[in-house]
Image (cartoon, coloured by chain):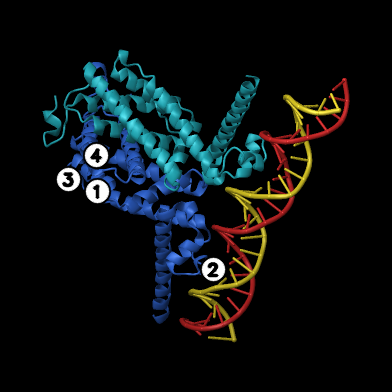
Chain colours: A cyan, B blue, C yellow, D red
Amino acid sequence: MTETLVQTKSDRTKSDRRSEILAAAQRCFVRSGFHGASMQDICSEAGMSAGNLYRYFPSKEALIAGIAERDRAEVAQEFASVDLSQGLFHVLEGMAHHYFAERSDEQVKLCTEIMSEARRHPEIARISTAFDADVKKWLVDLLSAGADRGDVARDVDLDAVAAMLMIIADGVWWRRALDPTFNAKALLPIFMDVTRHMLSGRSQTGGRTKGAAK
Amino acid sequence: MTETLVQTKSDRTKSDRRSEILAAAQRCFVRSGFHGASMQDICSEAGMSAGNLYRYFPSKEALIAGIAERDRAEVAQEFASVDLSQGLFHVLEGMAHHYFAERSDEQVKLCTEIMSEARRHPEIARISTAFDADVKKWLVDLLSAGADRGDVARDVDLDAVAAMLMIIADGVWWRRALDPTFNAKALLPIFMDVTRHMLSGRSQTGGRTKGAAK
DNA sequence: ATTTTGAGAATGAACGTTCATTCTCAGAAT
DNA sequence: ATTCTGAGAATGAACGTTCATTCTCAAAAT
């Protein structure tokens, strides 16, 4: 039992160390990007020698992968604890506010960094793709549940709406990352307006554009 | 006259060379990313030695900057030749089709590569920011002209709509770059639907007609 | 004869990673 | 109580590689 305790304690500290290293790496990646941050930078930020860091992570790529997976798990947890009782649009507005306005610049920049690297490293692409698929599924399920509550019109293509929501989210993140003056909060009204419209099922397509709409 | 011709010819070939080099660099950057592509790769692709390449561009960064500016000019020209006579939505649909579906994967990936690098290199950030500002202005002008034609409701916040259009464009590009199975063309209907709605000025928030604009 | 063009080896810095070595400290042995 | 022991933790200099950039020099053009 004593041995078990010791073992547990040892494990915990190892896990903590890994977390600390990931946090340090995250700060460096946000500051200088994945390629701009050297292992020495990360070691300094983590207050640790290079050799020791390699006892916790086998490579630089493993750091990004670790961060990506941590982010993925975090979002998954946030998604899992959604409460639909106050209506679908309440949920969507809360999420929009959370992901567009509340999320720190650091997290947003990190997200863009992961997207950039996903174009290069297959392992990160794998994590990223799996994450996107999860989000998509989760969103469709959410919209579907909203439809069951009567919050969504029946003839709406939930898949397309979910895709559009994800596209907008990506766009907002990149704009936030690239333009420091960008005001994501000011975008919320038009975003919610668009979202409500997409879920209302009242298509305006066709030649009857202006006059036909009620 | 001979001298003038020679001079002109010399200039032209120099300019051509620069174009060829940029094209080669573009292929390399699309294939491996800015950091993944070495100068040797680019030299090979351009069929040219390193020393010679440096006679045309002073640095690797200048290559990306050159590509970014070339792209910028290209888009600027496309925007300048817009014909509103068939209506604003015809123009918008054409642009959406062009930028979402027609643009090659290569151009899309290149665009994401430039965005990634804009987070690091100040010069590229400058070009990118200026480009965004130009696009924003063009879009607002376009929507404004559409409003003059009566294609747009009066109480619409054109600035917010332009911002949203750009956000969606960014999102689509990233999705195209990261997900080979993504079907941008299938997104066109819902995109146009959303666009029409935003410009109709009929906010659906709470059933009120307060308007999304300030 | 002078300049331009080009090739390709050379350079030096920076990087990720490794490794021989030292440190730490809990428990066993005395 | 003190010393011994050994294994994991940590170090940081060194390594090999890669890369952007520069140097050198010869052939072509003027």
Residues at discs 4 and 2 both on one chain: yes
Total marks in image: 4
Residue that carries the numbered disc 2 in the rendered image? B51
Q: Is residue B212 visible?
A: no
Secondary structure at badge 3 equals helix
Residue placed furthest toward the top: A85
Secondary structure at badge 4 equals helix
State which tag comes first along the sequence, 4 or 1. Answer: 1
Residues at discs 3 and 2 both on one chain: yes
Amino acid, disc 2? Gly
Left or right of residue B153, residue A29 in this image: right
Question: Disc 4 sits on a residue from what chain?
Answer: B
- The answer to which of B26 and A57 lies nearer the viewer is A57
State which tag comes first along the sequence, 3 or 4. Answer: 3
Secondary structure at badge 1 equals loop
Q: CA distance from mark 3 to mark 2?
A: 52 Å
Q: CA distance from mark 3 to mark 1?
A: 9 Å
Q: CA distance from mark 2 to mark 1?
A: 43 Å
Q: Determine the residue positioned at 45% across, 46% down.
A: A121
State which tag comes first along the sequence, 4 or 2. Answer: 2
Mark sitting on residue B82: 1
The image quarter in which residue B16 lies: bottom left
Q: CA distance from mark 4 to mark 2?
A: 47 Å
Residue that carries the numbered disc 4 in the rendered image? B187
- The answer to which of B162 and A204 lies nearer the viewer is A204
**Image depth: mark 4 or mark 1 in front:** 4
Q: CA distance from mark 3 to mark 4?
A: 25 Å
Question: Disc 3 sits on a residue from what chain?
Answer: B
